[in-house]
Image (spheres, grey):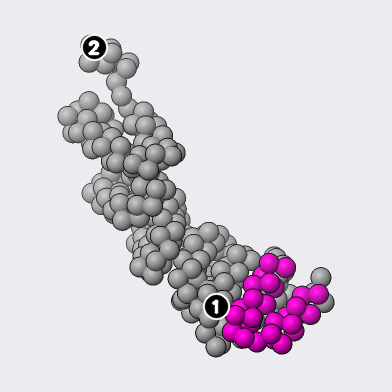
Amino acid sequence: AFKQGNESARPNVFLWSTLLDACSKSKNPDAWKVAENLFAAMQKSHKNGILKDPPNTITYNSIINACAKPKQPQRAELWLREMYKDYKKGNVAAQPNEKSFSAVIDAWAKSETEEGAERSEKILNDMIIYAKETELPVKPDAVSYNDVMIAYARVGLPRKAEAVLQRQYGDFKAGNKRAALDAQSFNAIIHGWAKAKEQISGERAELVLNRMVELHKQGILKERPNNYIYTTVINTWAVVGKPDKARQVFDRMLGDH
């Protein structure tokens, strides 16, 4: 209709963003390729003057999500970089926000590889640097920190997960209320120690449990350790061949409930 002279039918950014969003919600594993082709067509339309406005935050977030969900973290990160580059060139409508970074962090975290865990933390670092450079209120929340911790825990690197927890706690104490600690943070680290199966795994897992109890008493952590967390600590002692220690934690669990 637009090509036939109907100006009211001119495609706009909202229409293109809606198409990209549909790709991000598709169950087709190749939908991200369709999204990238759509984005290229959108850019061509803008260059030719048919589309008046450039891609905006919603547009970029849609294509990032389209790549992130089918486990294409490299492509999701590439589009985050393109988004930031576009913003730096003067397209203020393409300003990255928390969702932009969080989607890429989550995509890398779910790759379940050591590289993926490291890349997820790199994007977390980039998010913090971006906030300082632009003075925009783009701060990581508990979900982003947890994604990185879970990623390290899944590949058996609990020390790195603990280091991220310390960063999160420091960020929270510095005033970022979005980074408040929760039970999932501690559970991820305990799982990491169980997966590592080191001689000190049981001891370190129980130290994490103790820290959780302490922070709850101080009112910093809302949740108390639940049966699931106690069970994970018990299992960690079991896998390193310390049934007596496992029984002690079991008795402690009974006394705590």
> Measuring 52% from the left and 64% from the top, which residue is drawn there?
146
| 190 is within the stretch colored magenta | no
Prevailing secondary structure class for the magenta stretch in the rendered image: helix
Residue 193, numbered circle: 1
Regarding residue 31, the answer to whether it shows in the image is yes
Which of disc 1 and disc 2 is earlier in sequence?
Answer: 2
* Quadrant including the C terminus: bottom right
The 10 Å Cα crowd at callout 2, few under 14, some 14 to 19, many 20 or more, is few
The region drawn magenta spans 227-254
Disc 2, SS: loop
Q: Which residue is at the front of the view, 228 or 180?
A: 228
**Residue 255: quadrant of the picture:** bottom right
Specify whether 216 is left or right of 101.
right
- On the image, the x and y values in percent for residue 123 come to 37, 62
Mark 2 or mark 1, whichever is nearer to me: 1
Specify whether 110 is left or right of 52.
right
* Quadrant including the N terminus: top left
What residue would you read off at disc 2? 5
- On the image, the x and y values in percent for residue 204 come to 58, 83
> Measuring 69% from the left and 85% from the top, which residue is drawn there?
243
Residue type (three-letter) at the residue carrying disc 1: Trp
Regarding residue 167, the answer to whether it shows in the image is no
